[in-house]
Image: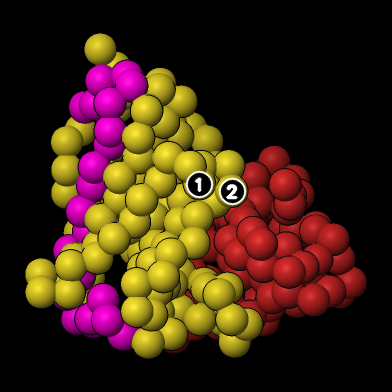
Amino acid sequence: QVQLQESGPGLVKPSETLSLTCTVSGDSVSSGDVYWSWIRQPPGKGLEWIGYIYYGGSTNHNPSLKSRVTISKDTSQNQFSLKLTSVTAADTAVYYCARGHESGYHLIPYFDYWGQGTLVTVSS
Amino acid sequence: SYELTQPPSVSVSPGQTATITCSGDALPKQFGFWYQQKPGQAPLLVIKKDNVRPSGIPERFSGSSSGTTVTLTISGVQAEDEADYYCQSADNNASEPVVFGGGTKLTVL
Protein backbone atom coordinates (compact mmCIF):
# COMPACT_ATOMS: atom_id res chain seq x y z
CA GLN A 1 0.00 0.00 0.00
CA VAL A 2 1.39 3.37 -1.06
CA GLN A 3 1.40 6.04 1.61
CA LEU A 4 2.47 9.67 1.48
CA GLN A 5 3.01 12.03 4.41
CA GLU A 6 3.60 15.77 4.23
CA SER A 7 5.78 17.56 6.77
CA GLY A 8 6.95 21.12 7.31
CA PRO A 9 6.15 24.39 9.09
CA GLY A 10 2.50 25.29 9.50
CA LEU A 11 3.22 29.02 9.61
CA VAL A 12 5.32 31.04 7.19
CA LYS A 13 5.88 34.79 7.18
CA PRO A 14 5.02 36.88 4.11
CA SER A 15 7.86 37.21 1.59
CA GLU A 16 9.62 34.13 3.00
CA THR A 17 9.94 30.65 1.47
CA LEU A 18 7.49 27.82 2.13
CA SER A 19 9.23 24.45 2.37
CA LEU A 20 7.47 21.08 2.57
CA THR A 21 8.63 17.48 2.31
CA CYS A 22 6.66 14.40 1.32
CA THR A 23 7.83 11.03 2.61
CA VAL A 24 6.78 8.08 0.47
CA SER A 25 6.35 4.48 1.54
CA GLY A 26 5.24 1.52 -0.56
CA ASP A 27 6.75 2.94 -3.75
CA SER A 28 9.97 4.58 -4.88
CA VAL A 29 10.40 8.20 -5.93
CA SER A 30 12.61 6.75 -8.68
CA SER A 31 9.73 4.78 -10.22
CA GLY A 32 9.12 5.25 -13.92
CA ASP A 33 5.83 6.60 -15.28
CA VAL A 34 5.11 8.24 -11.90
CA TYR A 35 4.72 11.94 -11.31
CA TRP A 36 5.38 12.94 -7.70
CA SER A 37 3.17 15.94 -7.29
CA TRP A 38 2.14 18.86 -5.13
CA ILE A 39 -1.44 20.13 -5.11
CA ARG A 40 -2.94 22.79 -2.86
CA GLN A 41 -6.38 23.89 -1.72
CA PRO A 42 -7.03 27.32 -0.18
CA PRO A 43 -9.56 27.20 2.65
CA GLY A 44 -13.07 26.74 1.25
CA LYS A 45 -11.82 26.70 -2.35
CA GLY A 46 -10.93 24.22 -5.06
CA LEU A 47 -7.85 22.24 -5.97
CA GLU A 48 -4.84 23.82 -7.67
CA TRP A 49 -2.00 21.80 -9.18
CA ILE A 50 1.43 23.19 -8.23
CA GLY A 51 3.80 20.89 -10.06
CA TYR A 52 5.50 17.51 -10.25
CA ILE A 53 8.85 15.79 -10.54
CA TYR A 54 9.22 12.69 -12.69
CA TYR A 55 11.59 10.21 -14.29
CA GLY A 56 15.19 11.23 -13.77
CA GLY A 57 14.35 14.46 -12.00
CA SER A 58 12.62 16.55 -14.62
CA THR A 59 9.95 18.89 -13.34
CA ASN A 60 6.85 20.63 -14.60
CA HIS A 61 4.96 23.43 -12.91
CA ASN A 62 1.71 25.31 -13.07
CA PRO A 63 2.46 28.23 -15.39
CA SER A 64 0.84 30.62 -12.92
CA LEU A 65 3.39 29.67 -10.22
CA LYS A 66 6.38 28.61 -12.26
CA SER A 67 8.86 31.27 -11.31
CA ARG A 68 8.34 30.68 -7.55
CA VAL A 69 8.28 26.88 -7.45
CA THR A 70 11.09 24.38 -7.00
CA ILE A 71 10.40 20.66 -6.70
CA SER A 72 13.20 18.23 -5.93
CA LYS A 73 13.64 14.68 -4.67
CA ASP A 74 15.96 12.76 -2.37
CA THR A 75 16.10 9.15 -3.49
CA SER A 76 18.15 8.11 -0.45
CA GLN A 77 15.33 9.22 1.86
CA ASN A 78 12.53 8.35 -0.61
CA GLN A 79 11.21 11.89 -0.30
CA PHE A 80 10.33 14.77 -2.57
CA SER A 81 10.08 18.41 -1.61
CA LEU A 82 8.45 21.71 -2.50
CA LYS A 83 9.84 25.20 -2.13
CA LEU A 84 7.61 28.18 -2.86
CA THR A 85 9.30 31.55 -2.65
CA SER A 86 7.99 35.04 -1.88
CA VAL A 87 4.79 33.80 -0.28
CA THR A 88 1.77 35.98 0.41
CA ALA A 89 -1.53 35.43 2.19
CA ALA A 90 -2.87 34.03 -1.10
CA ASP A 91 -0.57 31.03 -0.63
CA THR A 92 -2.38 30.00 2.55
CA ALA A 93 -3.75 26.56 1.79
CA VAL A 94 -3.81 22.88 2.59
CA TYR A 95 -0.89 21.41 0.67
CA TYR A 96 -1.17 17.83 -0.54
CA CYS A 97 1.49 15.60 -1.97
CA ALA A 98 0.21 12.94 -4.34
CA ARG A 99 1.36 10.15 -6.63
CA GLY A 100 0.55 10.83 -10.25
CA HIS A 101 0.12 7.79 -12.47
CA GLU A 102 0.69 8.32 -16.19
CA SER A 103 -2.64 8.40 -17.96
CA GLY A 104 -1.38 6.99 -21.23
CA TYR A 105 -0.64 10.48 -22.50
CA HIS A 106 2.92 11.59 -21.87
CA LEU A 107 3.26 14.08 -19.00
CA ILE A 108 -0.42 13.88 -18.07
CA PRO A 109 -1.07 12.06 -14.80
CA TYR A 110 -4.03 11.25 -12.64
CA PHE A 111 -3.62 11.02 -8.88
CA ASP A 112 -4.22 7.65 -7.25
CA TYR A 113 -2.61 8.18 -3.85
CA TRP A 114 -2.67 11.33 -1.73
CA GLY A 115 -1.20 12.44 1.56
CA GLN A 116 -3.53 13.66 4.27
CA GLY A 117 -2.58 17.28 3.58
CA THR A 118 -0.97 19.91 5.74
CA LEU A 119 -2.28 23.42 6.37
CA VAL A 120 0.23 26.18 5.76
CA THR A 121 -0.75 29.66 6.87
CA VAL A 122 1.08 32.72 5.62
CA SER A 123 0.96 35.40 8.28
CA SER A 124 3.27 37.72 10.17
CA SER B 1 -5.12 29.58 -19.06
CA TYR B 2 -7.21 26.49 -19.70
CA GLU B 3 -10.45 26.10 -17.74
CA LEU B 4 -12.77 23.23 -16.87
CA THR B 5 -16.31 24.26 -15.98
CA GLN B 6 -18.47 22.43 -13.45
CA PRO B 7 -21.82 23.40 -11.91
CA PRO B 8 -21.29 24.71 -8.36
CA SER B 9 -23.94 22.46 -6.88
CA VAL B 10 -26.16 19.47 -7.56
CA SER B 11 -28.90 18.17 -5.28
CA VAL B 12 -30.61 14.79 -5.37
CA SER B 13 -32.73 12.63 -3.10
CA PRO B 14 -31.43 9.29 -1.87
CA GLY B 15 -31.85 6.55 -4.45
CA GLN B 16 -31.98 8.97 -7.37
CA THR B 17 -29.31 9.51 -10.00
CA ALA B 18 -26.85 12.39 -9.75
CA THR B 19 -25.19 13.77 -12.87
CA ILE B 20 -22.22 16.12 -12.67
CA THR B 21 -20.80 17.63 -15.84
CA CYS B 22 -17.40 19.07 -16.67
CA SER B 23 -16.84 21.09 -19.84
CA GLY B 24 -13.61 22.00 -21.56
CA ASP B 25 -12.46 22.66 -25.10
CA ALA B 26 -9.73 20.01 -25.01
CA LEU B 27 -11.88 17.18 -23.66
CA PRO B 28 -12.40 15.61 -27.11
CA LYS B 29 -8.64 14.92 -27.08
CA GLN B 30 -7.86 14.49 -23.39
CA PHE B 31 -9.06 12.10 -20.70
CA GLY B 32 -11.22 13.25 -17.84
CA PHE B 33 -10.66 12.11 -14.26
CA TRP B 34 -12.96 12.51 -11.26
CA TYR B 35 -12.27 12.89 -7.53
CA GLN B 36 -14.53 12.81 -4.50
CA GLN B 37 -13.58 14.93 -1.50
CA LYS B 38 -15.34 14.77 1.84
CA PRO B 39 -14.79 17.46 4.50
CA GLY B 40 -11.38 17.27 6.11
CA GLN B 41 -10.21 14.49 3.81
CA ALA B 42 -7.90 14.24 0.84
CA PRO B 43 -9.49 13.73 -2.58
CA LEU B 44 -10.24 10.18 -3.69
CA LEU B 45 -10.02 9.09 -7.32
CA VAL B 46 -13.40 7.67 -8.38
CA ILE B 47 -13.11 7.65 -12.20
CA LYS B 48 -9.99 7.53 -14.41
CA LYS B 49 -9.61 7.80 -18.18
CA ASP B 50 -13.18 9.05 -18.73
CA ASN B 51 -15.00 5.91 -17.65
CA VAL B 52 -12.75 3.50 -15.74
CA ARG B 53 -13.63 2.80 -12.14
CA PRO B 54 -10.58 2.16 -9.89
CA SER B 55 -10.53 -0.89 -7.67
CA GLY B 56 -12.69 -0.43 -4.59
CA ILE B 57 -14.98 2.23 -6.03
CA PRO B 58 -18.67 1.21 -5.92
CA GLU B 59 -20.35 0.29 -9.19
CA ARG B 60 -22.87 3.11 -8.78
CA PHE B 61 -20.10 5.51 -9.89
CA SER B 62 -19.66 5.75 -13.66
CA GLY B 63 -18.18 8.16 -16.16
CA SER B 64 -18.74 9.08 -19.77
CA SER B 65 -17.42 11.45 -22.40
CA SER B 66 -19.08 13.22 -25.30
CA GLY B 67 -17.52 16.03 -27.23
CA THR B 68 -16.37 18.82 -24.94
CA THR B 69 -18.06 17.36 -21.86
CA VAL B 70 -17.23 14.57 -19.45
CA THR B 71 -19.89 13.40 -17.02
CA LEU B 72 -19.83 11.68 -13.65
CA THR B 73 -22.98 9.71 -12.88
CA ILE B 74 -23.86 8.32 -9.47
CA SER B 75 -26.75 5.88 -9.65
CA GLY B 76 -28.79 5.14 -6.56
CA VAL B 77 -27.19 7.96 -4.58
CA GLN B 78 -26.56 7.26 -0.93
CA ALA B 79 -26.15 9.71 1.94
CA GLU B 80 -22.44 8.86 2.10
CA ASP B 81 -21.99 10.20 -1.44
CA GLU B 82 -22.51 13.77 -0.25
CA ALA B 83 -19.20 15.45 -1.04
CA ASP B 84 -17.38 17.81 -3.37
CA TYR B 85 -16.52 16.37 -6.76
CA TYR B 86 -13.70 17.64 -8.97
CA CYS B 87 -12.89 16.85 -12.57
CA GLN B 88 -9.31 16.96 -13.86
CA SER B 89 -7.89 17.05 -17.35
CA ALA B 90 -5.25 18.79 -19.48
CA ASP B 91 -5.16 21.33 -22.27
CA ASN B 92 -4.66 20.27 -25.88
CA ASN B 93 -0.87 20.30 -26.00
CA ALA B 94 -0.16 19.50 -22.33
CA SER B 95 1.33 22.92 -21.69
CA GLU B 96 -1.04 22.78 -18.74
CA PRO B 97 -0.89 19.04 -18.01
CA VAL B 98 -3.02 19.18 -14.87
CA VAL B 99 -6.10 21.37 -14.58
CA PHE B 100 -8.92 20.92 -12.07
CA GLY B 101 -12.49 22.03 -12.46
CA GLY B 102 -13.89 24.36 -9.84
CA GLY B 103 -15.73 21.56 -8.06
CA THR B 104 -19.35 20.57 -7.56
CA LYS B 105 -20.99 20.21 -4.17
CA LEU B 106 -23.30 17.20 -4.21
CA THR B 107 -26.05 17.47 -1.62
CA VAL B 108 -28.15 14.43 -0.75
CA LEU B 109 -31.51 15.77 0.36
Q: Are marks 2 and 1 on the same chain?
A: yes
**SS category of the residue bearing label 1:** helix
Residue B29 in the image: above or below residue B7: below
Query: Crowding at label 2, few (<14), some or many (≥20) Cα neighbours within 10 Å?
Result: some
Q: In the rendered structure, which segment of residues is drawn in magenta?
A: A11-31
The amino acid marked with disc number 1 is Lys
Q: How many marks?
A: 2
Residue B84 showing in the rendered view: no
Asked where in the image residue B52 lies, by quadrant, the reply is: bottom right
Residue B85 in the image: above or below residue A77: above
Residue wearing tag 2: A63
Name chain A's colour.
yellow
The amino acid marked with disc number 2 is Pro
Residue depicted at x 38% and y 67%:
A53
Q: Chain of mark 1?
A: A
Residue that extends furthest to the right in the rendered view of this protein: B67
Q: How are the colours assigned in the image?
A: by chain
Name chain B's colour.
red
The one of B31 and A116 positioned closer to us in this rendering: B31
Residue wearing tag 1: A66
- Residue B68 percent location from the top left of the image: 86, 66
Residue that extends furthest to the left in the rendered view of this protein: A77
- Residue B97 percent location from the top left of the image: 61, 64
Residue A12: in magenta span = yes
Q: Disc 2, disc 1: CB below 8 Å?
A: yes
Residue depicted at x 58% and y 42%:
A64
Residue B51 showing in the rendered view: yes
Question: As drawn, is A27 to the left or to the right of A89?
Answer: left
Residue depicted at x 43% and y 64%:
A59
**SS category of the residue bearing label 2:** loop
* Alpha carbons under labels 2 and 1: distance apart: 5 Å
